[in-house]
Image: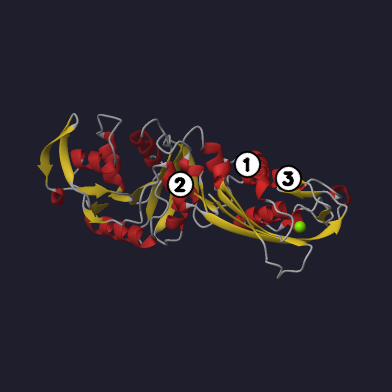
Amino acid sequence: MTYCDVIVLAAGRGSRAGVDKMLHRLLWDTVIERAVQAFASLDFVKKIIVAASADNIAEIENIFVDFRQKPVKVILGGATRHLSVKAALDKVQSPIVLVHDGARPFVSPPLIESVYKETLAKGSAVPVLAVADSIRKIEQDKIVGIVDRNNYVLVQTPQGYNANELKKAFSLADRIDYSDEAELYLQKIASPQIVEGSADNYKLTSPFDLVASGQKVGVGWDLHKLIKDKPLTICGVKVPYDWGLDAHSDGDVAVHAIIDALLSATGLADIGWHFPDTNPSLKDVSSMLLLAEIAQKLDTLGNSINNLVVLIIADKPKLNSFAEKMKDELSAVLGIKKEQIALHFKTSEGVYPPLTMQCWALCSLS
Ligand code: MG
């Protein structure tokens, strides 16, 4: 079999997305893990070289320390794409090399295979997409010409090359700011061959791409009995009432449901596992302190809350007038805006057993 080595570029500054895209979590895996995993499952891939930046190299090395599917070598990239590929090419030993943007984590094995096969047959392969929108030539703020979009394509990665020819192109380079390998190859070697790309293989660019591509939802539910002469605390707010919620903690039924929603979205065990009611130090504890601990845990895992929906079902007391104060408390502890929280109150119209209060919570994380 003719093997190929893969270069995955992860040294970009990510300035358009405002964060380091490579370390952003898509469901369970980071962007860079997803990109690498797509290649690791293919038998013709010999090894994967990840070009990282000085800022993310330690974390990326850590991500791949236990990676067993294929050898992954993390190297320090350069100040430009060209310099990163150049540094990585020094480590390439297979006759074929594929160069891929780490910010395209949804690349599919069939697309990679198509690039590999075309490179094997023709010496190069660049995946391209037809242009769907119209193209116009502009000058300053006016359209000054019509361009036939059928003469143009959008270029993706992975790009495949005969490794020796790409190394030769790099040795002949007279700049360090080629936009991609296809530009350099075209100028120094030959016209690269094209294959059909895929719309799924898009590049994560804006903060919206990051949010849209990695959403997780969670749900939580809780119920407590109301008992005489206990303070009633809901969403961290003391509600004047003769009855309070029976529990080992302060019984904040809404906060318990919210904690379970957050934990379920991240795939972690539920509230009872984290805060067992057999723990004497949690006797009468403020549930908001527990929520703060879970919020901290989410933060450490790299998750952020998109929105939170809380639905409290109780026939008594009336809670609507406390809604704003409750949102204030929740937004402060969770570090989100009040606009990201919806708080609804329902009665059971006397159908549910009296003297109970229950709460549903739903959340979306990215
Ligand atoms: Mg509870």
* Label 1: element kind: helix
Which of the marked residues, 2 or 3, is nearer the chain's N terminus?
2
Amino acid at dot 3: Gly
Q: Is residue 90 visible?
A: yes
Q: Label 2 vs label 3: CA separation?
A: 32 Å
Picture quadrant of residue 139 = top left
Amino acid at dot 2: Leu
- In this rendered view, identify the residue nearer to me: 287 or 146: 287
Identify the residue under disc 2. 210
Identify the residue under disc 3. 236
Residue 7 percent across, percent down from the top left: 39, 46
Residue 183 percent across, percent down from the top left: 23, 40
| Ligand 1 occupies quarter | bottom right
Q: Is residue 159 left or right of residue 327?
A: left
Picture quadrant of residue 108 = bottom left
Q: Residues within 10 Å of mark 1 (few under 14, many from 20)?
A: some
Q: Label 1 vs label 3: CA separation?
A: 11 Å
Identify the residue under disc 1. 331
